[in-house]
Amino acid sequence: MSRIDKLNSFMNEKGLDAVIILSDYNRRYLSGFTGTSGALVITPQERYLVTDFRYIDQASNQAPDFEIVNRSQGLIPEVVALLNQLKVEKVGFEGHIVSYDTYLELNKAQISLESISDAIEDIRAVKDQNEIETIKKAAEIVDKTYEYILSIAKVGMTEQELKAELESKMLHLGASGPSFDTIVASGYRGALPHGVASDKKIEEGDMITLDFGAYYNGYVSDITRTFAIGQPDPKLVEVYNIVLEAQQAAVNQIKAGMTGKEADAIARDIIAEHGYGEYFGHSTGHGIGLEIHEQPMLAKTVDKKLVPNNCVTVEPGIYLEGLGGIRIEDDILITENGNEVFTKCTKDLIIL
């Protein structure tokens, strides 16, 4: 079933005459259009892409299944005019994306608006084969990048310098850019789960956590590895082995039919059994695709079940203030019989 067919099925189920798509990611997913300005208006029979003169040729090439509307006024007024022309009544919109001011503008149409928050994101959560292959390629880029970093990291480099080397390598390997702000957290800064690179110099004995990802053809990868330069504190070596045990157990056991809560518990319970439960404060993982954080979530509050072709991260961690932290993360694809790991570089504790 195509993406539009899935959307049409949802519209039929909800009794919607049309949907309006304003999110950049959802617009790209449904139409193929990568421009930065545009809106989709989709009915069971018709597909419109509203954009401006800068993108007409691009839209025609990227979204051949859509009728391109070259707007002669503001984007939302043009959408309102189109909705009135179509004489639709019940129209879905992305309630989690649309601002209140935009909602008021849309409400000028002779329609009844109904939020479809997360509906497209739920469709996006199940990847097709092309998406899977693209994410695999993004994962290959970060694998090779980590191997490169292990060959050049040294005492005296700043975290920012290591970040620059890392991101440059990803670009050389075919990434269009990093998929989020690269985390390089060395020594005591490893206790910061989102310790983006700073001007701190790497010192002998530092554990270094790298959390980074590549954009490749619009899709992301997301990996975390922790290594040491010089002999690290024995406590951190102990913690490393606990995190690795928890992470590998989760990777080995996560499968379709398991809820996000059950998947999260695999790693969380092992860390808690070792006495570090209070030092693991974030969820075990999240979906990846067009965005770095998307559905589904592996978290202790999530009852939704994993299904084949979900692509998620598995990233437990332990963070000890003043000492440092450890996180290990892989990207995996949920399959009919378990999962497939996309990120394949070593998870052994490397001491340079």
Image (tube, rainbow, N blue to C red):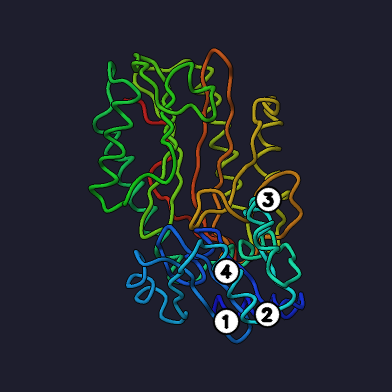
Quadrant of the rendered image containing residue 280: top right
> Residue 154 at what x, y percent from top left?
27, 22
Q: Is residue 308 left or right of residue 167?
A: right
Instruction: Give the Cα distance between marks 2 and 4.
Output: 23 Å
**Where residue 317 sits in the image (x, y, percent)?**
57, 33
| Mark 3, residue position | 100
The quadrant of the picture occupied by the N terminus is bottom right
Q: Please give the residue where the numbered disc 4 appears in the rendered image.
A: 79
Q: How much space separates mark 1 and mark 3, taking CA atoms?
A: 34 Å
Q: Secondary structure at mark 3?
A: helix
First-in-chain label (1 vs 4): 1
- Left or right: residue 60 compared with residue 104: left
Marks 2, 3: nearer the viewer: 3
Is tag 1's residue or tag 3's residue first in the polypeptide sequence? 1
Q: Amino acid at mark 3?
A: Tyr
Circle 1 residue = 1
| Front in this rendered view, residue 22 or 54 | 54
Q: Residue furthest bottom?
A: 45
| Residue type at the position of mark 1 | Met
Nearer the camera: disc 1 or disc 3:
3
Residue 9 circle label: 2
Marks 4 and 3, how far apart at CA: 16 Å
- Camera-near label (1 vs 4) is 4
The structure residue drawn at horizontal position 42% and vertical position 46%, both measured from the top left corner, is 179
Disc 4 marks which amino acid?
Val
Residue 334 visible to an observer of this rendering: no
Q: Are marks 2 and 1 in contact (CB under 8 Å)?
A: yes
For mark 2, give the secondary structure.
helix
- Tell me the residue at 69%/75% (across/down): 10
Which residue: 30% across, 46% down?
144
Occupied quadrant, residue 218: bottom left
